Image (spheres, rainbow, N blue to C red):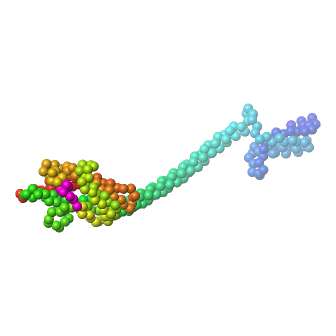
Amino acid sequence: MLKHQGFNKVKHIIFMSGLIPNTNELPQCLRSRLECKDILGAYGVPVTTLRAGLIISAKGNSYPILKNWYSMLRLISYYYFLKKEKELNMINIISAIGSLGTFIMALFYFVSVSVQLYQMKISFIPALGFNQILLIRDKDQKLNLKNTNSNVEENEDYLKLYNLGGGAAKKITIEVLLGEDKVIQKKYVNMLPSKEGYMLPINKTVFDELDDTIKNNGYESNMNIKLSYYHNVSRKKQEIFLKGHIDTFNNYKDKEIYELQFI
């Protein structure tokens, strides 16, 4: 071929080659391209080398190789992405578990503090009520009243109002009612401290109502008590409506005992 070139006085040679990496370790196919260029230039004829990046031809091998490389790189990229995504998901899961644990701890702390505050609030709230009251009818049909915590043997003409709560009750208004609106007795108490009692005197009208209820074999008395008061925890006026109820307590030959409750 070179002899033929020389005989025909070839003035210039254009050699189609490929990109050659700048390294000493080349595969055989790339080394053969360099050798061909050197051989062509050894006979004094100018040589121009075109280094093509990728030659696509009907029977070329470059494009199928590149296509296979691209497919492999795509699979590697997917694998790398899935691996990273899995790592990120695990990190997100661990972070979410940590955040959930922190939230649960904060919730427990909030509930604990709320319970403590509620208990402190209860410790300052008064609780007004009456102790157990016995009504004793003797053989002469005379009705006597007795508070169970009293040591007095004689008939008592008062009801014992107690404050069993933790805080003091202030500006107490006590109304003894017939029905829901007819006031038959009214008393005022400035303050009733915790664990203290107040003797609420009852008049003849109250005794007559209790006596009539027992005589008529009734249990639901028409007598009610309304308590209104204030305390330190809330500025709002508190109201309690207690309905009188009489139950049979015990019967003897010389007397009958009934229990008066305000429910």
Location of residue 64 in the rendering, given as x and y in whole percent from the top left corner: 69, 37
State whether residue 28 is above or below residue 112.
above
Pick the residue in front: 150 or 19. Answer: 150
Residue at figure coordinates x 68%, y 38% from the top left: 67
Relative horizontal placement of residue 140, taking residue 50 as reference (left or right):
left
Q: Name the residue furthest left.
A: 253
Location of residue 74 in the rendering, given as x and y in whole percent from the top left corner: 64, 42
Q: Name the residue furthest bottom.
A: 151
- In what quadrant of the picture does the N terminus appear? top right
Give, as a single range, the part of the protein colored magenta.
201-207
217 within the magenta span? no
Relative horizontal placement of residue 123, taking residue 81 as reference (left or right):
left
Residue 22 appears in the figure: yes
Pick the residue in front: 220 or 44. Answer: 220
Circle count: 0
Pick the residue in front: 234 or 115. Answer: 234
Residue at figure coordinates x 47%, y 55% from the top left: 103
Location of residue 259 in the rendering, given as x and y in whole percent from the top left corner: 17, 56
Residue 132 appears in the figure: no
Pick the residue in front: 161 or 63. Answer: 161
202 within the magenta span? yes
